[in-house]
Image (cartoon, rainbow, N blue to C red):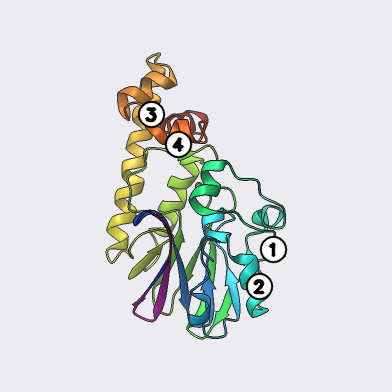
Amino acid sequence: MVTIRKFDEVYSYITTKRFLGRTLFSSNVYATGDVVIDSGMNRDISYFPELAAPSSLVLTHAHIDHAGNARAFAKTFGAPVYADQRAIATLSSHQRPSLLIRCKVGSAPPVDARPLPGPIETTEGLLEPLHTPGHCADHTCYYLPSRRHLFSGDLVLHATTTWVSSEVRIWEAIESLKRISKLRIDTLFPGHGEPFTDPHETIVYKHARLEALGRHVLDLSEDGMRPEEIRDDVLGREGPIAYLSRGRFSKLNLIKSFLDGSP
């Protein structure tokens, strides 16, 4: 199921996984001018006919819920797929997701992606890629200065950060948030959920909250608490996702990421 919305001159295609009438997961695809940002889950390509001769697809990162339709996009439109250099090996290989991920968002067939050449020309102006690691090493945001739009992938999300994947490097994510907070942004388009119309306040709040949480975690560790004890004290016990994913996604991952890095 795909829901189509328009914000300013940006079209949003919300690809959704549903079961028994309930939404299990959704992921956003955006079109600005003639460029598409992220491809959505490979559960549904029904938004493809709505795309008017796209010149290229740019990916925020290689995760399946963002890159699942990249191969279908390239075959359908004959247009290039671009991503950060660090994502190319993953995108060109057979990803083997867990059963949980396959049920939730499908898979991602290999795609012949190209490294980003720099700013991408669009009919709306230059789209600037910004390397923003933290969520994963290859994460990239895209900034359209002509309209003050930022497409933030999974760097800025609506949910409060409590459980994360084992890939997350939280101090890097905080630094990435600080960097994009210096941009002039009117609307922020996240990989999941509705656009933010108060982007500066949202970004500043998120990096300040995470930084304060991280320093609290470090203080508790210096007091001799184990990571599991810190998790229970600060975030509470694990939810079902930690067990269903066998620890791939968990609150403990967030605590360990604070402890493994440095502010």
Q: Of the residues shown, which amino acid type is indicated by label 1?
A: Val
Residue under label 2: 74
Q: Position of residue 220 (x, y in %)?
A: 36, 21
- What's the residue at 37%, 25% (across, down)? 231
Helix, strand or loop status at disc 2? helix
Decide: marks 3, 1 in contact (CB < 8 A)? no
Q: Residue furthest front?
A: 20
Identity of the residue drawn at 42% across and 66% down: 1
- Is mark 2 in CB contact (under 8 Å) with mark 1? yes
Amino acid bearing label 3: Glu
Q: CA distance from mark 4 to mark 2?
A: 40 Å
Residue holding disc 4: 263
Neighbor class of circle 2 (other Cα within 10 Å; few <14, some 14-19, many 20+) is some
Q: Residue 116 magenta-drawn?
A: no
> Do residues under tags 4 and 1 come within 8 Å of each other at their CB atoms?
no
Q: Are marks 4 and 3 in contact (CB under 8 Å)?
A: no
- Classify residue 216 by image quadrant: top left
Assign a secondary structure to mark 3.
Answer: loop
Q: Which residue is mark 1?
A: 111
Residue at 40%, 77% in the rendered image? 10
Which of the two residues, 105 or 83, is positioned nearer the viewer here?
105
Residue numbers of the magenta segment:
4-19
Closer to the N terminus: mark 3 or mark 2?
A: 2
- Where disc 1 sits, the SS reads loop
Q: Are marks 3 and 2 in contact (CB under 8 Å)?
A: no
Residue 66, horizontal then vertical, whole percent: 53, 59
Q: Residue shown at 69%/65% (left/top)?
A: 113
Q: CA distance from mark 3 to mark 1?
A: 35 Å
Q: Measuring from the top left, give residue 98's x and y in whole percent.
A: 58, 41
Q: Nearer the viewer, mark 4 or mark 1?
A: 1
Q: State which mark lies toward you, 4 or 3.
A: 3
